[in-house]
Amino acid sequence: MDSASKSVLLLQPLKFQAQVWTTALQSQQIEVIEEPVGISFSQLAGQRDAIERANIGLLLVDLGAQHLNAFDICRWYHDNYPDLKLILTAGLRKKVLSTERRLALEQGAEDLFPGFQQDNILPAAIGRVRRILEILRYHPLEEQNLIDDLMAFYRHGAVPAHKLPTPTEMAFSTSRQSCPIDFEENPQTTIILPERAYSVQRLSSPDESSTPVSPPSAPKPKLSKFYLKASLVALLLLIAGFWGWLRSPHQFQISPIQGAANLALTPTFSEVPDVPEGLYNYGGSATWALIRPRVEDAIAEVYPNLQLRYVETVQGTPGSGQGIKMLLDGKIDFTQSTRPLKDEEYEIATQRGFKVTQHAIGLDGIAVVVHPSLNVPGLTVAQLRQIYLGNINNWNQLGGPDRDIIPFSRQSGDSGTADYFQEYVLQNEPFSSTVVPIYSTTDALRQLNGATGGIYYASAAEVLYQCIGKPIPLGLSQDKLIPPQQGKPTQNCPPTRNQPNLEAFRDGSYPITRSLYVIVKENKDREQLIGEAYTDMMLSEQGQQLIEKAGFVRIE
């Protein structure tokens, strides 16, 4: 533990929020340096020496401070203060979506907190300050000091008198069982974040038991009538199609959307039958983070008693492979994936007494990006393959400048995108030792920004939005290179961002596409009930529209 004094640089434009943070942090002997509301990031960027002398270990920045989004703030932070920790806050908002928090974490922030509310300052502050002390590697939370100082803050009129907690309420609200704190005391054990705003849960290591606890009144499962009808129709169509194939002289080909339903089951989420209530955990693909905020908001509007909580593990990196493993281990109720199930995963499920089923709900294109200064017309899939196998290692071999190629990739086994890339682009050969492993797309783009010979691949919707890498066309041959974005790459990103080339992904002219899946556990229990209900919602007309708005191709 670092026992030296600590300082936090505060950029909080809302007076009440700034006062609570200052009071809470100072109660823990943390010096608070509050910058003027109007100060710009460019002014802060010129104060490196002063910030270092002040022993500042954390930037606490509100998203409204500069009217920027989380990515823009994180990018500024990485460019100017990569050695400091960063926590984002969300002004007056009572909650932030789990997917918003997840994106903030992927972009380099340590956390994203909602605003303090007058009726829950004390319990919220306990969890958040404890988290900050852990991040700073400072002393354990001095809870009584925090309570005393916040109670004095109450008494000085910062909060109306009728909002003052009674001693009984205060004791109750600070108990571990009832307090909506953000993190539990031991970061090595299971961390459960009870508010929907903090619905990311980090699971303990695989050898520890962490099976989710079912709600006491979880409903008995009933299979979706629409799903059963659709399954029967699909079976009849499959039989008819197989008969047609037997009679056809043409070679059988696998559709890029294999496993997809042919029809949307219902028009809207509200018309999906047998949607359960209660708390359900799910996990999986990082690519799905672009879809989750839209879907979670829409579900919450129609089904307020259904709470979906995204869960990730502390072992490995978040992704499709980790999600499937957690589903098989009984740690989540369903999962999202960018790759199909593997034979060994079907076998594990059978050995454990249940089945798993994949449902394709959309289509995604894989974009390749390079450093903005790199001048290359595009790549064939064969050339891309040789780069990641280590057989092409300089851009001058591809008509570009004399510059070493630095390929980045997420880890296969954890990432569905990396698994797909290895199987279909590398043809199941291993990545070269020259490939630099990275944790997330945001991490890759940050490193790509400093590597003029860098190259990276990821979901087009995800990587185009972040504006750092330059997308390059791909093709099966040099005379037919297709860009992953609509039109020419924008030079004004942001505020104008590149949009995925959905038409090329849909018609198959773009060479690298893959399906998005919901993976359902078929055990005639609550897991199957929520998995099928979620699948039905994603395959509804409303769900398909949300998928397309997020930058992916709908199933038609």
Image (spheres, helix red, strand yellow):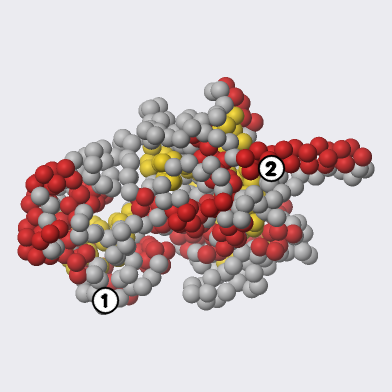
What amino acid does circle 2 point to? Ala
Asked whether 171 or 229 is in front, the reply is: 229
Foreground tag (1 vs 2): 2
Q: Residue 202: x, y in percent? A: 37, 41
Please give the name of the residue rendered at 74% of the width and 57% of the height, measured from the top-left corner.
508
What amino acid does circle 1 point to? Ile
Please give the name of the residue rendered at 45% of the width and 60% of the height, measured from the top-left corner.
446
Neighbour tally class for label 1: few under 14, some 14-19, many 20 plus, Cα within 10 Å = few
What whole-number distance in Å separates the C-alpha atoms at marks 1 and 2?
Answer: 58 Å
Task: Tell me the element at label 2.
Answer: helix
Residue 307 lies left or right of residue 551; in this view the side is: left
Please give the name of the residue rendered at 39% of the width and 34% of the height, measured from the top-left corner.
217
Looking at the rendered image, the quarter that the N terminus falls into is top left
Res 435 visible: no
Q: Residue 69: x, y in percent? A: 40, 67
> Which residue, given by chain and number where applicable, does mark 2 sit on?
230
Q: Is residue 170 above or below residue 376?
A: above
Disc 1 or 2, which lies upstream in sequence?
1
Task: Tell me the element at label 1.
Answer: loop
Asked whether 414 or 190 is in front, the reply is: 190
> Which residue, given by chain and number where applicable, does mark 1 sit on?
39
Looking at the rendered image, the quarter that the C terminus falls into is bottom right
